[in-house]
């Protein structure tokens, strides 16, 4: 049975058009830039194949040149959009500055050199193959991660298409293996079959990537306080466990602080809940900016916040943070809220001696810090108090 090249291309175009139409329906409208770029990439691929098929119906005319050039531009643009999506999902990708240049140069050279068949075929397919290779390279960093399977599948699809595209460019530019685009050469036929297969498998890989992104966003939402953007109680506990594991490995002390905005109910009653929300957001922002890299904060509920300082040195570390925060809060709250915002705080320092469970985190660090916080309130608010050494259980953290 012979395989007709144009029929194979038509099937690819139909598949891609259906996928391009289905992706927005599946993903919805509220998607990230990466997901939107995936939709654009698939749509541009579909447009590219449709244009190249239409160009065969008007061969030798001005429309042939316009449609063929538009097809090359669409396919190059699809790789650019895919590269942007990979960058958003995986971080900055190697050779990223070259992708837009190649995506623009590919159709430009093709259109200008359209009158020379060997040049236009060699130029366009060579640069498209390079774009495919750059996209494939973009899937390989980091080499090991929990989400490596979809990247491997996508990389294989891109490499397969790069190989066929490069082969078509070499044959078209340097040999007379096929004198026209429609020649039923084995490389042409193989390229059309590969395009069908990789179109489906590539979209499957990208759907898995989008699902992974969506799950990560849901996890982040579940552990983030919606008002302030910092960790909520659940997120704080999760991050605290990691910090304490590192502190256990290095033998470093950890200082916990509990902070509570003073007279917050009065602020709500006097100025309204909207101003109260602004006060909470301002405090969370200034607290975040006062932290050193690696320290963690969280909103425990209401106007109460928690802090863990890594590599801490007891009272000096807590007092330095307190001084930085209190001075900025006094200045910026007066300017942004129209009144001075203040807080009370309690601190407790201890060194992990064994793996710490979530319950031990609360009893060995947060509870003493909370007790010191209430002592600060009882002594007039607007101050930092330290928990007594005996209340932290520093010498027996490995027990019970």
Image (tube, rainbow, N blue to C red):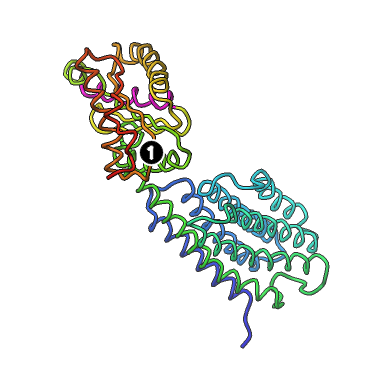
Binning the other alpha carbons within 10 Å of mark 1 as few (below 14), some (14 to 19) or many (20 upward) gives many
Instruction: Give the residue displayed 30% in from the left and 11% down from the top.
Output: 340
In the picture shown, does residue 306 fall above or below 148? above
Instruction: Give the residue displayed 60% in from the left and 74% down from the top.
Output: 193
Location of the N terminus (image quadrant): bottom right
Quick check: can you spot residue 179?
A: yes
In the image, the segment drawn in magenta is: 272-291
Q: Is residue 279 magenta?
A: yes
Location of the C terminus (image quadrant): top left
In the picture shown, does residue 374 fall above or below 380? below
Residue 397's quadrant in the figure?
top left
Question: Mark 1 = which residue?
Answer: 352
Residue 270 place in picture, x, y as percent:
18, 15
Quick check: can you spot residue 221?
A: no
Left or right placement of residue 206 versus residue 177 in this view: left
Instruction: Give the residue displayed 39% in from the left and 18% down from the top.
Output: 319
Instruction: Give the residue displayed 41% in from the left and 20% down from the top.
Output: 316
Residue 239's quadrant in the figure?
top left
Residue at the bottom extreme?
A: 1
Q: Is residue 268 magenta?
A: no
Labels in figure, total: 1
Near-viewer residue (341 or 134): 341
Near-viewer residue (231 or 166): 231
Residue 350 place in picture, x, y as percent:
36, 32
Near-viewer residue (134 or 67): 134
Residue 275 place in picture, x, y as percent:
26, 21
In the picture shown, does residue 179 fall above or below 282? below
Left or right placement of residue 79 versus residue 251 in this view: right
Q: Main secondary structure of the magenta part?
A: helix
* Mark 1: secondary structure: loop
Left or right placement of residue 163 versus residue 272 in this view: right
């Amino acid at each position: 049975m012979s395989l007709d090249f144009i029929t194979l291309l038509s099937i690819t175009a139909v598949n891609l058009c259906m996928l391009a139409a289905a992706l927005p329906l599946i993903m919805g409208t509220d998607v990230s830039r990466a997901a939107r770029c995936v939709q654009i990439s698939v749509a541009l691929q579909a447009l590219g194949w449709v244009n190249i098929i239409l160009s065969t119906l008007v061969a030798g005319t001005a429309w042939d040149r316009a449609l063929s050039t538009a097809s090359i531009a669409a396919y190059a643009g699809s790789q650019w959009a895919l590269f942007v999506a990979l960058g958003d999902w995986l971080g900055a990708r190697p050779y990223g500055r070259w992708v837009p240049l190649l995506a623009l140069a590919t159709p430009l050279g093709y259109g200008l050199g359209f009158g020379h068949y060997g040049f236009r075929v060699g130029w366009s397919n060579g640069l498209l193959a390079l774009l495919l290779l750059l996209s494939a390279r973009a899937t390989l960093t980091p080499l090991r991660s929990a989400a490596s399977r979809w990247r491997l599948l996508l990389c294989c699809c891109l490499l397969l298409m790069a190989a066929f595209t490069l082969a078509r460019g070499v044959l078209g530019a340097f040999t007379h293996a096929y004198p026209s685009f429609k020649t039923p050469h084995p490389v042409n036929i193989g390229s059309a079959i590969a395009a069908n297969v990789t179109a489906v498998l590539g979209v499957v890989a990208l759907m898995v990537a989008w699902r992974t992104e969506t799950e990560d966003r849901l996890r982040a939402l579940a552990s983030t306080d919606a008002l302030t953007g910092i960790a909520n109680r659940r997120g704080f506990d999760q991050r605290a466990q990691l910090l304490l594991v590192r502190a256990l490995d290095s033998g470093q002390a950890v200082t916990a602080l509990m902070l509570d905005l003073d007279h917050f109910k009065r602020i709500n009653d006097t100025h309204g809940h909207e101003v109260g929300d602004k006060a909470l957001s301002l405090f969370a922002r200034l607290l975040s900016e006062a932290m050193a890299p690696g320290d963690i904060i969280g909103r425990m509920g209401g106007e109460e916040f928690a802090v863990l300082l890594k590599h801490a040195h007891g009272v000096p570390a807590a007092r330095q943070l307190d001084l930085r925060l209190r001075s900025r809060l006094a200045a910026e709250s007066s300017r942004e809220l129209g009144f001075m915002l203040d807080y009370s705080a309690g601190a407790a320092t201890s060194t992990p001696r064994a793996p710490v469970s979530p319950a031990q985190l609360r009893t060995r660090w947060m509870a003493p810090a909370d007790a010191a916080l209430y002592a600060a309130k009882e002594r007039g608010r607007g101050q930092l108090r330290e928990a007594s050494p005996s209340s932290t259980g520093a010498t027996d953290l490995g027990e019970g």
